[in-house]
Amino acid sequence: MKTTRLAAALILAGLAGAATAAPETYLLDASHSQVVFSYNHLGYSTTTGMFSGFEGEILFDKEDPAASSVTVSMPVLSMFTGWEAREDHFFSGDFFGAKEGDMITFVSTGIEVTGDNTAKITGDLTMNGVTKSVVLDAVLNQMGDHPMANKPWAGFDATTTVVRSDFNLGMFAPYVSDEVEVRISIEAMKAGADNT
């Protein structure tokens, strides 16, 4: 039972549990993976936005969890705020200076299992041409066979706080909060299981 629970906890870090000693690969389900961000606007409101369009690969090595890894990327231009003028400003030279093909990436560098279904994930976040180490507080939602896809599936949520000025995105700080709260929800499917 402890082994099963430990494997479940490891998946939180973007590591997929494996039934055999050979490393197994899981692919992110872009249609059910999102990053939602929020920040304080001049003390009057909390403003939110989101990114989608994920690509990513999760590799779990049961024999050596430290060798496991996750690599995730999403297009800057996938940002959605619900207000076109705000998105245009974020894409402008005041912030991202975004163009087609620009990506935000996360590459895991370590994991600390903190409970039966919780873990801290450390990784390199690259955004706007700057790379910084961040720590995600992750919670396993569920793992098992997807009831509709009939494939091994896993899902987890995670939170972190990003200081936008660290990534040269600090315009209007501190009046518009420099700290941005980030909430992540991701699903992943086992590779090679007749994925379509």
Image (cartoon, rainbow, N blue to C red):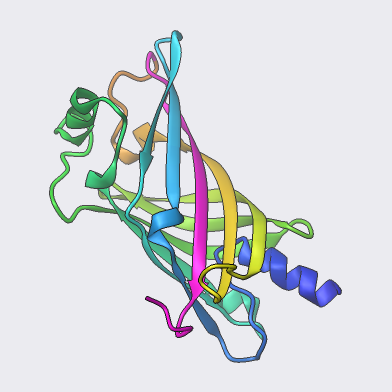
Q: Viewer-proximal residue, 62 or 194? A: 194
Q: Is residue 109 left or right of residue 74?
A: right
Q: Is residue 44 left or right of residue 118?
A: left
- Is residue 128 visible in the rendered image? The answer is no
Quadrant of the rendered image containing residue 91:
top left
Quadrant of the rendered image containing residue 140:
bottom right
Query: Which residue, as the protein is rendered here, is positioned at the far front?
Result: 148
- Is residue 118 visible in the rendered image? The answer is yes
Asked if the magenta segment contains residue 194, the reply would be yes
In this rendering, is residue 172 above or below 102? above
Quadrant of the rendered image containing residue 48:
top left
The quarter in which the C terminus is drawn is bottom left
- Tell me what residue is drawn at x 65 percent, y 55 percent: 141
Asked if the magenta segment contains residue 49, the reply would be no
In this rendering, is residue 144 above or below 83? below
Image position, residue 59 (x, y; %): 51, 77
The quarter in which the N terminus is drawn is bottom right
Image position, residue 14 (x, y; %): 55, 64
Image position, residue 89 (x, y; %): 19, 27
Q: Is residue 89 left or right of residue 70?
A: left
Query: Which residue, as the protein is rendered here, is positioned at the far right?
Result: 1
- Tell me what residue is drawn at x 78 percent, y 68 percent: 5
Magenta stretch, residue numbers: 175-196
Q: Viewer-proximal residue, 130 or 48? A: 48
Q: Is residue 125 left or right of residue 97?
A: right
- Tell me what residue is drawn at x 36 percent, y 20 percent: 173
Image position, residue 60 (x, y; %): 57, 77
* Number of numbered discs overlaid on the protein picture: 0
In this rendering, is residue 26 above or below 36? below
In this rendering, is residue 20 above or below 46? below
